[in-house]
Image (spheres, rainbow, N blue to C red):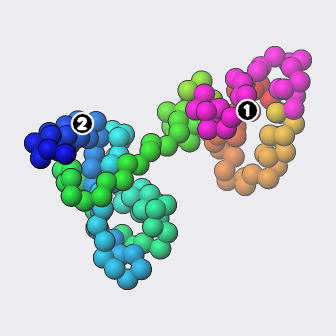
Amino acid sequence: MDDQLKQDLVSLIEKRIQSNGYVFTVEFIYRGKRKYTQLYYSQGGTVNRAMIEDDLKKIYPEASLVIFRKSEFAPGNPLIIMREGAAWTKKSGKNKEGGLNEKGRKSYERENPGSDLKAPSKKVGNPRRKSFCARMKGMRKRQKPENNTGDDRLSKSLRAWNC
């Protein structure tokens, strides 16, 4: 490959990475050796030490993080692109009144083919509602009394289903 073409390609990749997300240079110890890599996060939220440690352990199970810092993309170092978590596991996929919102249900269905999540039903004769209320009221008995604040996710879900 022509050197000029290679430089243009690297420059294009660098611009795209810097404009769409964040690159972190990570220094860690793996099996007694000090190693470096770059982690790319496309999300705009905060990336903290715990998140980087968790992601690093997915790739290098016994690794211990030494230091990380936000940096520019360096073409010579390995780059690992970290996938953003599914909406159903984050606040953006959860309904404020309990349960999942439409975005959360769709993201769960994408990750679990064959599943068919539906919105809560408040209709009294609905068998889905009857089954849900029976199962979740049993969870209420297992819940610690100090967690039963009325503002916890279980209470919100029971209210959403009109239990």
Residue 62 pos. (x, y %):
47, 74
Residue 29 pos. (x, y %):
35, 75
The span shown in magenta is 106-131
Local packing at callout 2 (Cα closer than 10 Å; few below 14, some 14-19, many 20+) is few
Count of marks overlaid on the render: 2
Q: Report the residue marked by disc 2.
A: 16
- Above-or-below relation of 69 to 117: below
Structural distance between the alpha carbons of marks 1 and 2:
35 Å
Residue type (three-letter) at the residue carrying disc 1: Gly
- Quarter of the image with the C terminus is top right
Residue 140 left/right relative to 111 = right
- Quarter of the image with the N terminus is top left
Q: Is residue 63 visible?
A: yes
Inspect the magenta stretch and tell me whether residue 22 lies in it.
Answer: no
State the residue at coordinates (49%, 69%): 61
Q: Report the residue marked by disc 1.
A: 114
Residue type (three-letter) at the residue carrying disc 2: Arg
